[in-house]
Image (cartoon, rainbow, N blue to C red):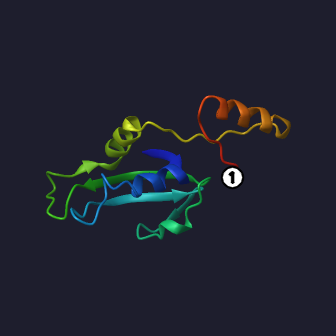
């Protein structure tokens, strides 16, 4: 099972190392939930907001249009590997409103970015 944010899921789906037109990789056989509601697997990625809570049950990753059942990998394995290899991570935090300026300054001080959603 995959639990992630809308932002991270969209970044995964848009990663050209995993999905590109030349080799035609794809995913299937999964159940996708956005904020607890199941959506069709032919969903439009543009409906996903960065702050959405995403849950994916099951799923298979096929590395090319010529894949056989032997070539497929469980989607959660591919996602976890992708996430581990990244140099960035996504956090959603809840803070007191009066701490926003301090938190932004701290994040900037260590060379990162914060986005208000």
Query: Residue at (79%, 37%) from the top-left corner?
Result: 101
Q: Nearer the viewer, residue 115 or 59?
A: 115
- Residue 79 appears at what percent x and percent y? 37, 45
Q: Which residue is mark 1?
A: 117
Left or right of 106 on screen, residue 85 = left
- Residue 113 appears at what percent x and percent y? 62, 41
Q: Is residue 7 above or below residue 47?
A: above
Query: Residue at (37%, 58%) from the top-left corner?
Result: 30
Q: Nearer the viewer, residue 27 or 85?
A: 85
Q: Is residue 45 above or below residue 30?
A: below
**Disc 1, SS:** loop
Q: Report the quarter where the N terminus lies.
A: top left
Q: In which quadrant of the rendered view does residue 59 lie?
A: bottom left
- Residue 99 appears at what percent x and percent y? 81, 34
- Count every numbered label the image shows and give the total: 1
Left or right of 80 on screen, residue 95 = right
């Amino acid at each position: 099972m995959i639990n992630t944010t809308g932002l991270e899921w969209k970044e995964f789906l848009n990663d050209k190392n995993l999905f590109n037109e030349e080799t035609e990789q794809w995913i299937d056989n999964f159940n996708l939930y956005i904020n607890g509601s199941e959506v069709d697997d032919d969903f439009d990625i543009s409906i996903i907001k960065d702050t959405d809570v995403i849950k994916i049950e099951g799923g298979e990753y096929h590395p090319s249009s010529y894949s056989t059942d032997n070539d497929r990998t469980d989607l959660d394995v591919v996602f976890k590997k992708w996430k581990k290899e990244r140099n960035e991570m996504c956090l959603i935090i809840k803070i007191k409103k009066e701490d926003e300026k301090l938190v932004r300054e701290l994040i900037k001080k260590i060379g990162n970015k914060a986005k208000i959603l």
